[in-house]
Amino acid sequence: MTRSTLVCGLTLALLTPGTKAGEAPLEQTIPQQVVVTGGQTDMNARRDSTAGKMTISRKRIEESGVEKVGDLLAREPGLPSTLGALRDPAYTQFLIDGLPPAKNQNPADLDLQLVDKIEIIKTTVAEFGPYGIAGTINIITRKIIPEQKKIDLRAAYNSSAGQSGVSISSSLSRGKDEDILSMNMQMSSSYKTMESNSSLSQTSVSSLPGMTQQLQGQLATSNRFATLGVSGNIIWRPGQRYQIVFSPAINASTSTWENADIRTWDNGSSLEMNEVFHGNTETLSLPLSWTFRLDEQSQLTLLGQANRHRGRNETVRNEYRSGPGISLRRSAADSSGNADTFKLDYKTVLADVHEIKAGMHLTRSSDSSDEKHWLNGNRDIGLDEFNAPYSLVETKTRWFLQDDWRPGDSLFLNMGVSGEQTELDLQEQNYHTRALYRVLSPSMHVQKKLNADGDQRVRFSLARSFNAPHSGDLMQRPVINTLAPCMANRVCIANGIETADSSGNPDLQPERALSINLTYEYDLAANSLLSIGLYTRDIDKKRGSEIRLDNVAWSNQARYVSRPVNFGDASVHGIDMELQLALRDLNARAPDASVRAGFGLADSRVNMRSGLDMLTDKQTPWNAKLGASYTAKAWPLKLDIDANWMPGNWVRVNAQQRIFSPREFSLNAGAIWKFTPETRLTINVANVLADSRVSVTEYASIDGIVRQQNLNKSHTLLSVRLNFKL
């Protein structure tokens, strides 16, 4: 079969409904003239990317001195804390090796010991799929560490407000890139404790003249969290054209938290609630990939992956109310699920100017959960009925086709299209929900060099992207507010708008966005860059929540219930500015130091069906970052300092609720001392200027206004880590 025949065949297959895009970048670089990657710095890789993809390499990860993916992203100047001016993580797509994370896996908590590099793109490209309205962050895990002969160990101790934690991680590799058989293993384990305390002041002003009620409260939480993860890679190269990789991983976690909530009203009534939660989760991942190099410029990769997870949790809550008296509640839940994935990726180079990528991706997953409830030692029949076992089956088919075309030395084009079809079947006792939606995402990116040297560039991006609802948002089973629980026989303590129950909405639709980015970049020097970017997002079917007083099946009186809805259209506009400056680019005799800065301005509005305009939730009008690094000449010492600012800001969540988020300022500092090339000590101090912050939530209804003020105390975190090799 000729190469052209194969390309045509794959293209026809991908354009047929029922196929889907693979999202992972291939591990092997194809020798070609479109993109030269060998020996590239992070800055050069960004300059060569038509869509402006930023890369954090393994070298920068090791030099950062931080422990988690989230800590590293927080200091990245090109990644504002309001990525794409939409802070909600739902708008930023996180991938691990090009695939969505496993259930219960938080990519921000991933240990950097397991990460090879991180790719960041603030727009939508076909190879990453149709999602990511605010962009995509793709985390590439480490495979083989060439020629590593020793065990790399890292031990850490953390302390904050008298609470401590420890962690240990290690890695071991055997083999080189050209060996027939090479393998490695990584292990990480952590244990940490956390405490938080806050005070609550609530005022309820009735629509009736003279009716005002006051509430004072104290909340205290103590958490203990432990994790253990083991993963590995076995790479077999039976020939120069073949590579097979098996990468099993198992993770387990356990968490326990105790929560005490004491509330007193001015009419003499009171509530004291003590709650203890304990949960365990285990996940198993078994991916197997096969890469076949068709010729010098083409390769095909097939991936099969099986994920399994299960969990169990138990909650015991003791309530004392001045009216009804003492209630003892207990609930237990068992959950399990699996996800099987098949992924096919193909890429080739045509005429030395077209880098063609294509792929399809099929995932079928199922989840089930069984909950049981007890009230004062007896089965709570009401909650058992409405939180009965559920089962969920979801099938996703995705495809993509992309052409990175370089018609000349100064003009680069990236054009592509991706699509997905999702089928969901949800069974909840007496409720049966079926959902089917299809999305199609075309994208175009243009980069133009403005001068012969190519140190001034302008990029333009236009893309259609989506944000799909989570399966949990479709479930109709209620979550009854613990501050206004239901008793036996559907007799409930009356809830207010501030203590609403929650339930899903099976009619939710994906949000659809038209995104435009315009960026100017100027290379100040080899390792220095200035970037100014304008962006706009117009979102149809903006998703949020609404609170309504409804007659519900789980209570004999009307209850306030919060549900997710598609309630209108949103528009977001903003500007991001970034500066990275190495002092030695200005003067060869300058200290080995660098400065990084980021600043963003944003404006956003939501036009609700009611005609009410409001800021999008979790949006701030501006944000800023400033950081610096210094490597000493006389000592093996590297210093880092980072500061982040966001102003206090009112945002409206829905027609009934608005929230004031207080001003945020964080100052973090770190130091790395290298005793030998194989031993180093890292000290990080996060939130150096810890302070107290007041947040405010207001609820408005026909009955009046409820205003809550929460005083929260933040704490400084000290982390000490030792890396060494045995």
Image (tube, rainbow, N blue to C red):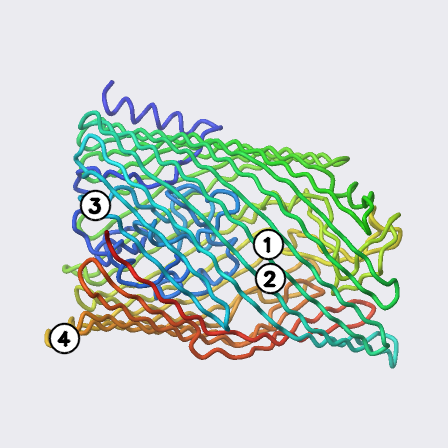
Find residue 542 and name its label.
Answer: 1
Q: Secondary structure at mark 3?
A: loop
Q: Secondary structure at mark 1?
A: strand
Q: Earlier in the sequence, mark 4 or mark 1?
A: 1
Q: Quadrant of residue 214?
A: bottom right
Mark 3, residue position? 35
Mark 2, residue position? 606
Residue 165 in the image: x percent, y percent? 46, 62
Q: Is residue 76 left or right of residue 29?
A: right
Determine the CA span between mark 3 and mark 2.
Answer: 41 Å
Identify residue type, mark 3.
Answer: Val
Determine the CA span between mark 3 and mark 1.
Answer: 38 Å
Which residue lies at the image location 66% right of the left edge and 52% below the top edge?
564
Give the tally of numbered discs.
Answer: 4
Q: Nearer the viewer, mark 2 or mark 4?
A: 4
Q: Is residue 414 left or right of residue 310?
A: left
Residue 689 in the image: x percent, y percent? 45, 79
Identify residue type, mark 4.
Answer: Ala
Contact? badges 1 and 2 (CB < 8 Å): yes
Identify residue type, mark 1.
Answer: Lys
Contact? badges 4 and 1 (CB < 8 Å): no
Q: Earlier in the sequence, mark 1 or mark 2?
A: 1
Which residue lies at the image location 50% right of the left edge and 61% below the top edge?
86
Residue 315 in the image: x percent, y percent? 68, 52
Identify residue type, mark 2.
Answer: Val
Find residue 634 and name its label.
Answer: 4
Which residue lies at the image location 20% right of the left edge and 40% below the top edge?
353
Q: Specify the farthest residue to the bottom.
A: 210
Q: Earlier in the sequence, mark 3 or mark 4?
A: 3
Q: Nearer the viewer, residue 96 or 63?
A: 63
Determine the CA span between mark 4 and mark 1.
Answer: 56 Å
Residue 621 in the image: x percent, y percent? 50, 72
